[in-house]
């Protein structure tokens, strides 16, 4: 099965990198949508169906925390697994984001295989 | 404690370079490069326990090759803005990684990295400075806090 993934990050360079490492890692990527912040991501999700969301936390206009709250509050969106990709790997932050509804967490820096493993765990991909 | 923080700074920098920028620092300086134009310098402030700031200074040739590796593009087609964006991202990753190890039981806030034109080099007395050698230039990171860091928690990967 191939997956449609939404990458949410204010850095175009980081979005391009995440897309590339997903491909390099062998993750079965059908399509990759992108958004530059939480508000933009919600707009994308109104018109597009995705299998998983990869999101940063620190972003302008709407950060990852608020984005996750909005996703969780929406019955049609909350079933989509969200994985945080962040430089903040503190225990407190990880617990906070998981309590808000994140299903996975990848700390930067990461290897391509780390991202693939976390994404597949959240998507319950069977090897 | 200063030595421990310096070790963390070195480990986090090497890890970020290797895992996400596909660059391995050299143990000795490469041959000096002629016509060294100003380095690409990114700085960011952070709030936490303690608060402080972080600086990353990369020689122009090294900055361009790091950006090319990160973006999987040819060096000669990259714009100055693309190179600066990648150096800001690298500063963000290294600083976040250092703070995760130093302040792992509390949260911290990173401001957005900014490119600093005509940056003054940080002095050793004011900050912890670590220099790395890449095949095509130098790479310096600086870390300073408003008060000494008093605890380094064990890092759990």
Image: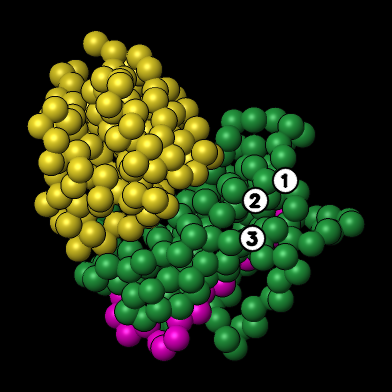
In the rendered structure, are the residues bearing label 2 and label 3 in contact, judged by CB atoms less than 8 Å apart? Answer: yes
Q: Which chain does green denote in the image? A: B
Residue on which the image places disc 3: B115
Residue on which the image places disc 1: B80
Q: Quadrant of the N terminus of chain B?
A: bottom left
Tell me the distance, in whole angstroms, between the alpha carbons under discs 2 and 3.
7 Å
Residue on which the image places disc 2: B84
Chain name for mark 3 = B
Q: In the rendered view, does B97 fall on the left or right side of B38?
A: left
Q: In the rendered view, does B2 fall on the left or right side of A45?
A: right
Residue A48 in picture, x, y percent from top left: 30, 20
**B89 in magenta:** no
Q: Which chain does yellow denote in the image? A: A
Label 2 vs 3, first from the N-terminus: 2
What span is colored magenta in the figure?
B137-152
Q: Are marks 1 and 2 on the same chain?
A: yes
In the rendered structure, are the residues bearing label 1 and label 2 in contact, judged by CB atoms less than 8 Å apart? Answer: yes
Residue A9 in picture, x, y percent from top left: 41, 42
- Image vertical order of residue A17 relative to residue A96, above or below: above
């Amino acid at each position: 099965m191939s997956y449609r993934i939404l990458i949410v990050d204010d850095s175009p360079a980081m979005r391009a990198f995440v897309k590339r490492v997903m491909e390099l890692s062998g993750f079965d990527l059908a399509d990759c949508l992108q958004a530059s912040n939480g508000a933009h991501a919600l707009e994308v999700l109104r018109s597009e169906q995705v299998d998983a969301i990869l999101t940063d936390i620190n972003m302008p206009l709407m950060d990852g925390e608020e984005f996750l709250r909005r996703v969780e509050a929406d019955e049609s969106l909350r079933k989509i697994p969200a994985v945080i990709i962040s430089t903040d790997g503190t225990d407190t932050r990880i617990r906070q984001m998981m309590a808000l509804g994140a299903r996975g967490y990848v700390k930067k820096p990461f290897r391509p295989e780390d991202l693939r493993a976390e994404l597949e765990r959240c998507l319950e991909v069977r090897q | 404690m200063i030595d421990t923080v310096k070790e963390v700074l070195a480990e986090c920098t090497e890890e970020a370079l290797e895992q996400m920028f596909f660059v391995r620092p050299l143990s000795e300086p490469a041959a000096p490069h002629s016509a060294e134009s100003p380095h690409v310098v990114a700085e960011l402030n952070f709030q936490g326990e303690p608060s402080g700031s972080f600086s990353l200074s990369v020689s122009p040739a090294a900055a361009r090759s790091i950006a090319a590796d990160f973006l999987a593009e040819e060096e000669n087609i990259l714009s100055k803005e693309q190179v600066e964006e990648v150096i800001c991202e690298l500063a963000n990753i290294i600083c976040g990684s250092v703070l995760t190890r130093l302040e792992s039981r509390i949260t911290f806030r990173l401001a957005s990295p900014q490119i600093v034109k005509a940056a003054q080099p940080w002095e050793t007395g004011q900050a912890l400075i670590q220099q790395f050698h890449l095949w095509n230039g130098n790479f310096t990171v600086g870390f300073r806090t408003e008060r000494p860091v008093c605890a380094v928690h064990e890092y759990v990967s």
